[in-house]
Structures are given as structure tokens and as C-alpha cells.
Amino acid sequence: MKQELLTMSNQELRQYLSSHRQDEDAFSEALEVLMSRKKDTIKYPAISENNYQELQDIFKSRLNSN
């Protein structure tokens, strides 16, 4: 089954996911294949309390500048 999923395009995989929502195993396999194709994922660090105020200040200044 997974080999068949590997030959599908991303659009076909999305359609497959949509039509197999109730089949947990099939859905999981298809989602794994689709997510493995994702490139250039951006990972952001979690916001800590120290950075929270700094981020608020940045957003406020950007909002006020427009």
C-alpha cells in the first residue's frame, strides 16, 4: 500500500486523505508520505517569558508605524 502512495502526486495524496478519513491506518500512512515530501520547513523556537515582552514591543511598534 505504501508503495502505491509513494507514486501519487501531492494533490492525489490530499484527495486520498480526504476520502480515507475514517481509516486510521490508511490515513496515517498517506499523511506520513505527504509530510515526508515537505521541504524547507521553518522551525521557530518557543516563546519564552523573556522574549514575550520584546515581541510585544516589536509588534506594537510595527502596528503603530502604519
Image (cartoon, helix red, strand yellow):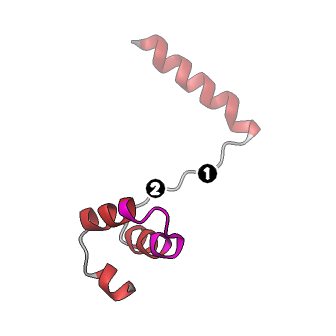
Task: Give residue 42's mark.
Answer: 2
Residue numbers of the magenta segment: 19-28
Q: In the rendered image, which residue does mark 1 sit on? A: 45
The answer to whether residue 55 is left or right of residue 17 is right
Element assignment for label 2:
loop
Q: Is residue 20 magenta?
A: yes
Which SS does the magenta portion mostly show? helix
Check if mark 2's residue and mark 1's residue have beta carbons within 8 Å.
no
Q: In the picture, residue 35 is in which quadrant? A: bottom left
Spot occupied by residue 53 in the image (x, y as percentages of width and height): 69, 28
Quarter of the picture containing the C terminus is top left
Q: Where does residue 28 sit, x and y in percent of width and height?
A: 50, 71
Mark 1 residue type: Pro
Residue 14: quarter of image: bottom left
Q: Residue at x 55, y 18 (%)?
A: 60
Q: Is residue 22 magenta?
A: yes
